[in-house]
């Protein structure tokens, strides 16, 4: 104990004495640990998604693989009659829960008294129709009511936060809400706020599945040929029953219910796979988490390298103490422990700083990554364990080598201050460490430059239509009189230049594909065509170019078609003109092709242009694109708001600029870029601390050499060259290693984008340029100070 | 107490071989106060370091208290050292980050002396050396003489059988030097064996035997006049 106290006393005094060294070390480690901790929290959060349900290991989602012609389509959903058939044919399944997730729903609260105002809410993705079995499958905390309430149609269960939004502090039970101004639901249950680490954490309003059947055409229950990704089926298998045992029965099941059974195949997807599998809509591929973990390890590693570098350089200051302790009888092991303990104290301080930094950064990270990460030191055993592992791991990784070097000093040399660079691991080790750090930094700089270049490209590349100065409005119902009123009134607003009604903007979230048949061919084409119902003003409003034929005539129903160049190619035609006048059919509606349009992107640039068909079909219009004069935006928006609410008094008004909506396609890239930039800056900063350590070490070691050289007539510039040559050589070696690694990693990343920036020499020149500049700033001042020092001082001290 | 036979120490670098100790035969009896003199580079300090077991010999035998210690492992040498030897250096070699009290206490931490006894011994010694009032000061806050007295206190706190002093007065003015020499003499008169390296004839004569070295060898051994 006394020895420990002695170690701690001397450690604290030393850390206080060499304040700048301590601060640099704590800062470097704290930054590395902060990144490691954030990445740990993020990875743990994602790995924990939906694992908390009591039956999690036995829950599966039935997914569908469609094999149509050349296309393979993976869907997270099942056809509408699927659930009933599954229950019938597989009675061994413990429970089946059908769920229909909804988006962009208008909910109006209906007050108990007529004189109270109604409130309108737009639920973006918070609503789903569920069977009572949903709550036997997934764990929710019921504050009021019970799942059986959802057996009957037009019953609803709501989460407490949404209930508060709807009804304030009033008891929601028994209240009425209206869906899309048509269907009334009674609130019969209240749930606590669902856990954030759930795929369904956004779903806050659960309507009874029975009502979905009541609202929709009952024919859908016999429709085995159509499928929506939003209509999902969750099953719980009893203990001991393997998913394979169920899946073995699926081929016969497919044959029994599907006419073209070879096009359909069902699979059971484990619940834990849902969040990660991008084939079925999983948001967070595990490869991304893996890459993040590597980045985290890199950052912690570079911080440790930094520490080793600084600590071994600093070891000279401790040599006499080591010598004295050895003379007084200290063993090597005791000295090793003593210095390891000092590293432990620094790591502990860095951990405390990291926890503060993480708490400060969490809101930004949560916002950026759509997570709900928390730091709770009192009850989070996993976090405490991680911190403990971090404390011991970093202490050992960073402290073991310097402690080993220090403890190994020969007492006679140590006491006489004759420890040389060779004893301290020499220059070559130090050089190796700095090169490693700069390899990491440069790879991250390459990543940041490439990702930000690709982001710029994605944001600014032409999508084949005009996305600027266009305001998108919802069209709540396809009534012709409303649309006409809206069109005429909006066009009268000064500054509104054009407008078009369509299912959506040329590129948007809503996509609809269909089988198509061309000309006199006997079979449907073996691929799907993207359908974009729109009026005749669509091309001019969005600036889409016609390459052959003419535009659509005004109309309310399908009377003629426009197809794009990709469709012409897919149909095997030699020229756009060849398509003109030929008959074309989708949804069984045959009509002539009257024109061919230039390709435009109907999704993000992550996807290639799909074959697309445009046709008038008023009942499918759900959006209105208004091209405006941006110089008068506030007035125009105010007028649009007023007019829209006059035309649709019962609906919920919202607007969005098309370019903003398109920018949202790239949220993942944006988050990735922000994180890469942050990590890159931190890696660079830690790298600079390492360089700073090296230059301090070098100036201390070269004092005599500098003195002698100056006495012999060397100028300051010539002395600076001594340092410059050394550092630029290290950076160059690091670059030679980092450039191919960075090139490989970023080429692989860019492969996911059919439209991408070239990985040219500029990226690499910028990388080495930036590194050199940062290095120059870091080592410049120190080197200059050493070069300008009075030679008498250094020689005298020798 | 000490007996060396053909004790050698050779420093080798890639190209140069330097013989610091050349087959030194030496015997020091318990209770002696031996001064080692000689020109710079003659091997005095090397002899002290080898005998103090902070450096290992290249050849020959070294018996300390009847036991061959020249070829002991680092761990065993450190064990012998901490229980039997005390060191006093020219440049004091106090640990800057420890107070006077803590510096003197430090050797007892390695020999696991109980806390109460440590306190008592440190206080006694500091009183004896007349630096008790400086117990909470750091070395750099003391004069050279005070620092060396602390160093002597640290060297004897474990009650070593042998004190090795490497030019203990080299960094001190004559008054302080005298004081340190008197302390050493006092310790010797109380039974502690002392081996001291010095350049000063005056200091050497505080001992009872003077060994002169040249080029790594003992060239003469004389008793100090008063012991003749």
Image: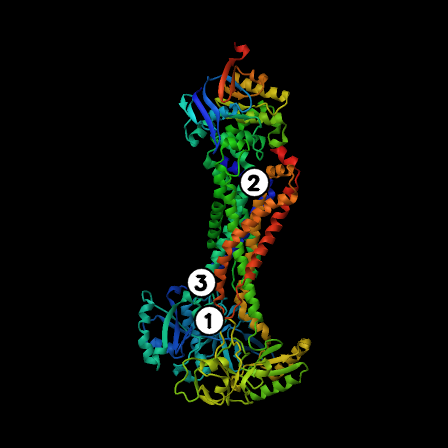
Q: Is residue A27 visible?
A: no
Element class at badge 3: helix
* Residue A545: mark in rendering: none
* Residue A12: mark in rendering: 2
Residue drawn at (55%, 83%), measured in percent from left and top?
A546
Question: Which chain does the numbered disc 1 sit on?
Answer: A
The 10 Å Cα crowd at callout 2, few under 14, some 14 to 19, many 20 or more, is some
The 10 Å Cα crowd at callout 1, few under 14, some 14 to 19, many 20 or more, is some
Residue drawn at (58%, 28%), measured in percent from left and top?
B91
- From this view, report whether residue A33 is shown above or below residue A546: above
Say which residue label 1 marks: A145
Say which residue label 3 marks: A286
- Answer with mark 3 or mark 2, whichever residue precedes in sequence: 2
Element class at badge 2: helix
- Residue A489 x %, y %: 64, 85
Q: Quadrant of residue A543?
A: bottom right
Quarter of the image that includes the C terminus of chain A: top right
The 10 Å Cα crowd at callout 3, few under 14, some 14 to 19, many 20 or more, is some
Which of the pair B127/A575 is nearer the observer? Answer: A575
- Residue A90 x %, y %: 32, 74
In the image, taking residue A537 as reference, residue A133 lies left or right, namely: left
Which of the pair B71/A64 is nearer the observer? Answer: B71
Residues at badges 1 and 2 in contact (C-beta under 8 Å)?
A: no
Do pointers 1 and 3 mark residues of a single chain? yes
Q: Can residue A729 be seen in this view?
A: yes
- Answer with mark 1 or mark 2, whichever residue precedes in sequence: 2
Question: Which chain does the numbered disc 2 sit on?
Answer: A
Q: Distance between the residues labelled 1 and 2?
A: 60 Å
- Residue A579 x %, y %: 48, 86
């Amino acid at each position: 104990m006394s020895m420990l106290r002695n170690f701690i006393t001397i450690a604290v005094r030393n850390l206080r004495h060499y304040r700048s060294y301590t601060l640099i070390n704590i800062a470097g480690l704290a930054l590395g640990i902060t990144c490691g901790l954030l990445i740990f929290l993020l990875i743990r959060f994602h790995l924990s998604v939906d694992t908390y349900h009591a039956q999690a290991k036995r829950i599966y989602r039935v997914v569908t693989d469609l094999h149509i012609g050349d296309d393979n389509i993976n869907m997270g959903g099942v056809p509408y009659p699927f659930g009933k058939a599954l229950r019938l044919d597989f009675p061994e399944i413990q429970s089946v829960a059908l769920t229909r997730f909804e988006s962009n729903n208008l909910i109006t609260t209906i007050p108990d008294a007529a004189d109270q105002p109604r409130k309108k809410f737009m639920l973006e993705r918070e609503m789903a129709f569920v069977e009572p079995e949903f709550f036997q499958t997934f764990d929710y905390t019921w504050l009021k009511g019970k799942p059986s309430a959802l057996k009957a149609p037009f019953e609803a269960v709501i989460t407490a936060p949404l209930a508060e939004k709807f009804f304030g502090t009033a008891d929601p039970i028994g209240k009425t809400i209206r869906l899309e101004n048509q269907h009334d639901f009674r609130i019969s249950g209240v749930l606590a706020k669902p856990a954030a680490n759930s795929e369904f954490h956004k779903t806050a309003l659960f309507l009874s599945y029975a009502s979905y059947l009541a609202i929709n055409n009952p024919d859908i229950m016999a429709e085995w040929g159509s499928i929506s990704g939003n209509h999902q089926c969750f099953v719980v298998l009893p203990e001991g029953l393997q998913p394979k045992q169920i899946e073995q029965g699926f081929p016969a099941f497919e044959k029994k219910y599907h006419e073209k059974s070879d096009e359909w195949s069902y699979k059971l997807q484990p619940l834990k796979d849902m969040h990660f599998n991008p084939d079925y809509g999983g948001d967070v591929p595990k490869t991304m988490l893996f890459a993040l973990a590597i980045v985290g390890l890199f950052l912690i590693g570079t911080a440790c390298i930094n520490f080793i570098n600084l600590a071994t350089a600093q070891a000279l200051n401790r040599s006499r103490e080591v010598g004295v302790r050895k003379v007084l009888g200290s063993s090597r092991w005791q000295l090793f422990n003593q210095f390891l303990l000092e590293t432990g104290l620094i790591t502990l301080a860095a951990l405390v700083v990291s926890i503060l930094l993480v708490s400060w950064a969490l809101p930004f990270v949560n916002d950026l990554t759509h997570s709900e990460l928390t730091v709770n030191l009192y009850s989070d055993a996993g976090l405490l364990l991680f911190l403990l592992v971090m404390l011991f791991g970093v202490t050992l990784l960073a402290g073991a080598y310097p402690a080993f070097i220090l403890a190994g000093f020969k007492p006679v040399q140590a006491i006489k201050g004759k420890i040389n660079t060779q004893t301290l691991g020499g220059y070559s080790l130090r050089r190796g460490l700095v090169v490693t750090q700069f390899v990491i930094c440069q790879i991250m700089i390459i990543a940041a430059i490439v990702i930000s270049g690709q982001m710029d490209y994605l944001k600014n590349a032409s999508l084949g239509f005009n996305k600027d100065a266009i305001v998108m409005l919802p069209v709540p119902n396809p009534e012709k009189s409303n649309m006409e009123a809206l069109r005429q009134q909006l066009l009268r607003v000064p500054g509104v230049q054009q407008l078009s009604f369509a299912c959506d903007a040329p590129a948007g979230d809503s996509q609809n594909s269909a089988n198509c048949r061309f000309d006199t061919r006997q079979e449907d084409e073996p691929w799907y065509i993207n359908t974009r119902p729109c009026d005749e003003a669509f091309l001019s409003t969005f600036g889409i170019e016609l390459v052959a034929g003419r535009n659509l005539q005004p109309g309310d129903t399908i009377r003629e078609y426009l197809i794009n160049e990709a469709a012409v190619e897919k149909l095997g035609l030699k020229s756009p003109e060849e398509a003109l006048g030929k008959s074309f059919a989708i949804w069984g509606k045959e009509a002539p092709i009257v024109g061919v349009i230039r390709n435009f992107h109907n999704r993000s640039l992550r996807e290639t242009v799909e074959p697309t068909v445009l046709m008038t079909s008023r009942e499918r219009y759900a959006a209105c694109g208004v091209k405006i004069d941006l110089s008068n935006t506030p007035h125009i928006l105010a007028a649009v708001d007023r007019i829209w609410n006059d035309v649709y008094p019962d609906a919920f008004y919202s607007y969005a600029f098309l370019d903003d909506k398109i920018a949202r396609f790239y949220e993942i890239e944006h988050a990735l870029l922000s994180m890469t930039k942050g990590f890159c800056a931190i890696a660079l900063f830690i790298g600079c601390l390492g360089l700073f350590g090296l230059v301090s070490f070098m100036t201390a070691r070269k004092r005599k050499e500098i003195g002698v050289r100056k006495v012999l007539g060397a100028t300051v510039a010539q002395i600076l060259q001594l340092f410059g040559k050394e550092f630029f050589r290290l950076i160059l070696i690091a670059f030679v290693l980092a450039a191919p690694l960075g090139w490989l990693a970023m080429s692989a990343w860019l492969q996911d984008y059919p439209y991408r920036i070239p990985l040219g020499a500029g990226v690499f020149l910028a990388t080495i340029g930036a590194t050199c500049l940062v290095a120059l700033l870091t080592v410049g001042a120190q080197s200059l100070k050493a070069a300008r020092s009075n030679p008498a001082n250094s020689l005298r001290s020798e | 107490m000490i007996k060396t036979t053909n004790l050698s120490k050779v420093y080798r670098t890639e190209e140069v071989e330097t013989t610091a100790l050349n087959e030194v035969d030496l015997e020091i009896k318990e209770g002696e106060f031996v001064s080692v003199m000689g020109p710079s580079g003659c091997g005095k300090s090397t002899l002290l370091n080898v005998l103090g077991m902070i450096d290992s010999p290249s050849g020959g035998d070294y018996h300390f208290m009847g036991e061959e210690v020249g070829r002991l492992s680092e761990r065993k040498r450190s064990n012998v050292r901490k229980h039997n030897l005390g060191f006093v250096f020219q440049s004091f070699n106090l640990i800057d980050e420890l107070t006077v009290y803590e510096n003197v206490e430090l050797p007892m931490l390695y020999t696991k002396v109980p806390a109460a006894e440590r306190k008592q011994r440190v206080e006694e010694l500091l009183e004896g050396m007349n630096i008790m009032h400086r117990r909470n000061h750091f070395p750099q806050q003391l004069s050279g003489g005070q620092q060396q007295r602390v160093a002597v206190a640290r060297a004897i706190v474990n009650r070593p059988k042998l004190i090795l002093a490497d030019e203990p007065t080299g960094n001190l003015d004559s008054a302080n030097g005298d004081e340190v020499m008197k302390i050493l003499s006092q310790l010797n008169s109380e039974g502690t064996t002392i081996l001291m390296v010095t350049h000063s004839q005056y200091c050497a004569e505080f001992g009872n035997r003077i060994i002169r070295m040249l080029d790594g060898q003992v060239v003469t051994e004389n008793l100090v006049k008063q012991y003749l």
